[in-house]
Amino acid sequence: MSKDKVLNMKRLVLALCAVGVLGAGAAIAVQGTHDAPAAGAQVAATPAPGVPANAAAGAPAPTPAPMIALPDFSVVASRNGPAVVNISTTGSVKTSYDNRGEPFADDPFFEFFRRFQGPQGPQRGGQAPSHGVGSGFIVSADGLIMTNAHVVRDASEVTVKLTDRREFRAKVLGSDPRTDVAVLKIDAKNLPVVPLGRSMDVKVGEWVLAIGSPFGLENTVTAGVVSAKGRALDDGSVPFIQTDVAVNPGNSGGPLFNTKGEVVGINSQIYSQTGGYQGLSFAIPIDVAQRIRDQIVATGKVVHAKLGVLAQEVDQSFADSFDLPSPEGALIVNVEKGSAAEQSGLKPGDVVRAINGQKIVASGDLSSYVALAKPGDKVTLDVWRQGKAVSLAGKLGNATERTLANAGGDDDSPVAKSRLGLALRPLDPLEKQAVGLASGLVIERAGGAAASAGLQPGDVLLSVNGRPVNSVEQVRDVVSKSSKSVALLIQRGEERIFIPVRLG
């Protein structure tokens, strides 16, 4: 055999060996996936790619998670896009700051992210022309349109432009600044409409779609997921849906769709430090918006229910102070005199844990429930008071009715220093008149745990762990029975707030 033939034979053997190795591995992989190996066959210890190690060892393979396909929003966009309109307004507004240099100052949405940023320039007054751009959506074939109240605020002329390029002069049937919902009407027939869903069925993490006119770019589609529900902003009267959908100035008043193509919210606010989208968008739940729309269409005005309380969050310190099993509920800071809350027996220091059977986890849940109710609706409150569960019943009042501020009792006591590190004394007659209180203990000095918690000289101590205190002895008595922390209700200026103080 020649030398060349020997080399060729060697190359052939090596090639066959390589094919044999690859072929064996492939055969094992196929057998592992489909058929059991024949008796006596040698199976590699390392499982084939895609086969779990425990499967190779004879253990049952875990059930794979179902495939999750990304939604195709093209159907929603093509079907509902024609019912989304562009809204432009002209008018005049009172100015209290300098808008010069703000690229979005003419857009009504500017007011909302400006609130998070603070004033942008020196103060000035007077009137200035305004030109706004927003969005809306058609809810009836005869021309009923929903949008944001701030889109048409201070507008002397409102123009609605459809996707077929037709333009109509719109009439503002009514608007509600509290919920930021407005209803318009145009003189048209056989218009495309959007289907309305239920915001209460929206789930955190589900996909949603926004259609609007950001920066005047009509029928722009953006998508994202629901980030949270029940977000309390401003006065807490609207339980906003938080999303990460890209919403910018001009999207205001536009619809937020679910994957079924149903409107579940009205895009209303963004959080921004730049004037543009930064990942936090807030939509008004359509359940709230529909209630406002129905009132506007029926009567031209809106009435809101009112409980008449000021509430704050319950954290772990408050839960320890009030012997709560968990840090949940709405801690009542103040009860308005003559309000529905006072008539039901609600008191400062109570923790509302449920209303009409609906659990209250965060304080915003309470205001969100009231926002969806009507004046005169009956409510049952599940309350935690001084370590015990109490049930209270009452009727919600009307938010337009005026109520008086609440006041307390009267007592005197000498200056003393409590275990909290507070120097306390009763209010003198002039101080009572000045702050509008009949009782309370003035904090003259704050040190130790109290100072660390943020208590300041001049604060007025009203209660400890929900128990009104009119003397230093009462403070000492409550504190002596507390082990971890105490919750102090104080009045600072015109505001009341609970402050938790850790003991020891």
Image (cartoon, helix red, strand yellow):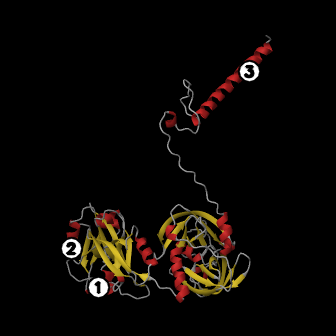
Residue 12 — which label? 3
| Residue at x 28%, y 74% (from the top left corner) | 463
Which SS class for mark 1? Answer: helix
Graded by Cα atoms within 10 Å as few (under 14), some (14 to 19) or many (20 or more), the crowding at tag 3 reads: few
How far apart, in angstroms, are the residues tagged by discs 2 and 3? 100 Å
Q: In 3D space, how far apart are the residues under numbered discs 1 and 2 (Cα atoms)?
A: 19 Å
The residue lying toward the viewer, choosing from 232 and 139, is 139
Q: Position of residue 415 (x, y in %)?
A: 21, 76
Residue at 26% across, 86% down: 429
Residue 273 place in picture, x, y as percent: 56, 68
Precedes in sequence: disc 1 or disc 2: 1
Q: The disc labelled 3 sits on which kind of residue? A: Leu
Q: Is residue 57 left or right of residue 9?
A: left
How far apart, in angstroms, are the residues tagged by discs 1 and 3?
Answer: 106 Å
Q: Amino acid at mark 1?
A: Lys
Q: Which residue does the numbered mark 2 point to in the structure image? A: 474
Disc number placed over residue 475 in the picture, else none: none
Q: Please tell me which of labels 2 and 3 falls first in the chain.
A: 3
- The residue lying toward the viewer, choosing from 104 and 459, is 104
Are the two marked residues, 1 and 3, in contact with CB atoms closer than 8 angstroms? no
Choose mark 1 or mark 3, whichever is in front.
3
Q: In x, y percent, where is residue 74? A: 67, 63
Q: Name the amino acid type tagged 2.
A: Gln
Is residue 155 in sight in this rendering? no
> In the image, what residue occupies the spot 64% across and 70% down?
211
Position of 283 compared to 451: left or right? right
Q: Secondary structure at mark 3?
A: helix
* Of pointers 1 and 3, the one earlier in the residue sequence: 3
Quadrant that contains the N terminus: top right
The quadrant in which the C terminus is found is bottom left
Disc 1 packing (10 Å; few <14; some 14–19; many ≥20)? some
- What numbered label is drawn on residue 432? 1
